[in-house]
Amino acid sequence: MSIKSFIDYLQLEKKYSPNTIKAYENDITSFSDYNKNEFDQSSINKVDYSQLRSWIVKLVESKISNRSINRKISSLNTYYKFLLKIEKIKKNPLDNHRALKTKKIIQLPFSEKEVISALDINNFQNSFEGKRDRLIIEMLYSTGIRRIELTGLKIKDIDFSSKRIKVLGKRNKERFIPMLESTISLINEYMDYRNELKRIHNKDFLFLTSKGEKIYENLVYRITNKYFDYVSTKVKKSPHILRHSFATHLLNNGADLNAVKDLLGHSSLAATQVYTNRSIEEIKKVYSNTHPRNK
C-alpha cells in the first residue's frame, strides 16, 4: 500500500513524468524482490541498513555501474523520506549512507561548425522522413527542448503569428520559446509532406513516423546520432548534447544566464550553470589569444 501511495505522491504532488515514475517504481520493486528472497520480508518499510548494504554489494558484484547503483539508492532514499513524511517509519535507514564514487563524465557540446554541417540540406533525402529528420535536428538545437518535450509537441503548440512554441516541461510546467525563421521555414516544408501521409493516427502531434504514429524517444535519439555521426567524432551524440550545445552557444555569444535558464525550463540557476563551462575550442581560443607567452 505504501508503494502505491508513494507512486501517487510522485504523480499528483511532485508531478513527475511517467518515465521518471516508472524508474522509481522499478528501483523500489527490485529491492523489494531481493529483500523478500534474501530476508523473507514482504515489506521493505522496516529494513535496516545492513539489508540495503547487502543489496548494494550484490549489485556491485553483478557489474552494475556505480552511477546506476547510486540512482537506485536515491530512489529508495526518496521513498523512505516519503514514509517519514507520512509517519510510517521513525528513521530513514539510508540516513548515513554515502554514495559510491563515480567518474565525472564530461560531455562536450557540439561546435557551431558541427551543427551547421549536420543540418546541411545535402545530408537529408527529399522525402517525408528527410524533412522530418532535418526539422528534429533544427528544433532541438534552435529551441533547446528536451527529447520528451519534442515528442510531445502538438501542432496547436506552434504559434506562427508570434513566432513561438508552447512547451510542456517537467512537472507539467509550461514555457514559451521563440522560433527562428529557419525553424518556421522547415516546419512549413515538413508539414507539406506530413499532410500527404496516407494515414495519420495521431493527428494532434507535430512529429510522426512514416506510418502516421506519434514519434517515440528512441527514434529521436537514433536520428540525432545518425546525422552527427557524419560530422562529429564525439563519443556522445544524443539529443541532450544538442540541448547542451544550444545553451553553451548562447552563453558563449553573450546571452544572459537567467534568460537561458528560462528557455531551458530549469527551476534553479544551479542547473543552468553547468553550461557556463566554455567548450574546449573556446578555452583554447581565449588561451592562445591572451596568454603572455603566446605573444
Image: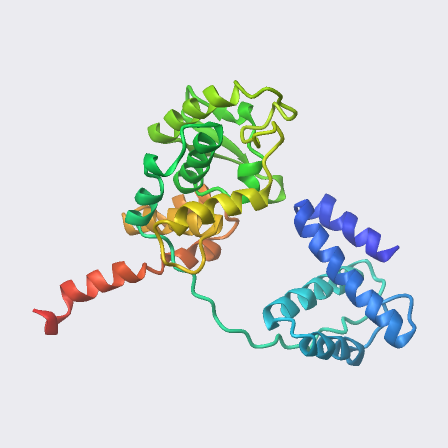
Left or right of 222 on screen, residue 257? left
Q: Residue at x 55, y 23 (%)?
A: 156
Q: Colour mode?
A: rainbow
As displayed, is residue 273 above or below residue 16?
below
- Residue 30, position as x, y percentages in the image: 78, 64
Outermost residue on the left side: it is 295
Residues 209 and 77: in front is 209
Residue drawn 56% across the image and 43% down it: 219
In this rendering, position of residue 98 left or right of residue 271: right
Identify the image quadrant of residue 183.
Answer: top left
List x then y, in percent, for residue 276. 36, 57
Residue 218 visible somewhere in the drawing = yes
Instruction: From this view, report whether residue 204 is shown above or below residue 48.
Output: above
Side (left or right) of 283 relative to 225:
left
Instruction: Tell me the quarter of the image containing the C terminus.
Output: bottom left
Which residue is found at the position 50% from the left and 52% from the top? 268
Q: Could you tell me which quadrant the N terminus lies in?
A: bottom right
**Front position in the image: 267 or 154:** 154
Inspect this view and state whether residue 169 appears: no
- Residue 262 pos. (x, y %): 45, 43
Count the marks: how many?
A: 0
Residue 88 percent across, percent down from the top left: 85, 63
The picture quadrant where one finds residue 79 is: bottom right
